Image: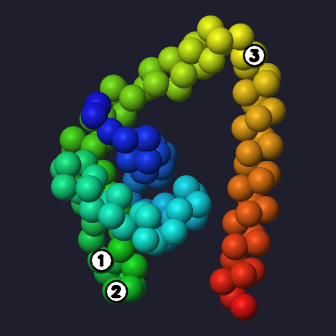
Amino acid sequence: MNLTYPQYLVLMVLWESDGISVNQIKEKLLLDTNTLSPLLKRIEGMGLIKRLRSTADERSVIVSLTEEGAKLKIQALPIPEKMLENLSAEGIEIDEIAGLRSMLNTWMKILSKNNNQNESK
């Protein structure tokens, strides 16, 4: 697939909800604009997404998959299962992974909340 992990994450968001705003992607991935904008530009340059100004709100940019970007979803389907297989081969149990993921999500929410509070000061 020749994608970086952050590029793969952006595509995963779009495979789940195509045609969403840059801000929605930013919120889902907890990325700032300075990180996400160049990332989207590179993915667009690969021909996997297109960015268009919203007709409802000129300030908003909508990101959609191209046909090529949508096709990549089929190639990417086995990736999560392969990752679990690799972790299991290392002796990490699935319930440990689930617990770690839950803990990381909690920490990310706390950090994001603190970051938003600091930005509003």
Q: Earlier in the sequence, mark 2 or mark 1?
A: 1
What amino acid is at disc 2? Glu
Q: Earlier in the sequence, mark 3 or mark 1?
A: 1
Q: Which mark is residue 93?
A: 3
Mark 1 is surrounded, within 10 Å at the Cα level, by few (under 14), some (14 to 19) or many (20 or more) other residues, namely few
What amino acid is at disc 3? Glu
Left or right: where does residue 72 sit relative to residue 106?
Answer: left
Residue 117 position within the rendered picture, expressed as x and y whole percent measured from the top left = 75, 80
Left or right: where does residue 38 sit relative to residue 121?
Answer: left
Q: Earlier in the sequence, mark 3 or mark 2?
A: 2
Q: Quadrant of residue 110?
A: bottom right
Q: Which mark is residue 58?
A: 2
- Between 4 and 26, the residue placed more toward the observer is 4
Residue 88 position within the rendered picture, expressed as x and y whole percent measured from the top left = 66, 12
- Between 82 and 65, the residue placed more toward the observer is 82
The Cα–Cα distance between marks 2 and 1, rounded to whole angstroms, is 6 Å
User: Which residue does the image show at 79% across and 51% down from the upper left?
Assistant: 106
Where 119 sits versus 62, above or below?
below
Nearer to us: label 3 or label 2 = 3
Q: Which residue is mark 1?
A: 53
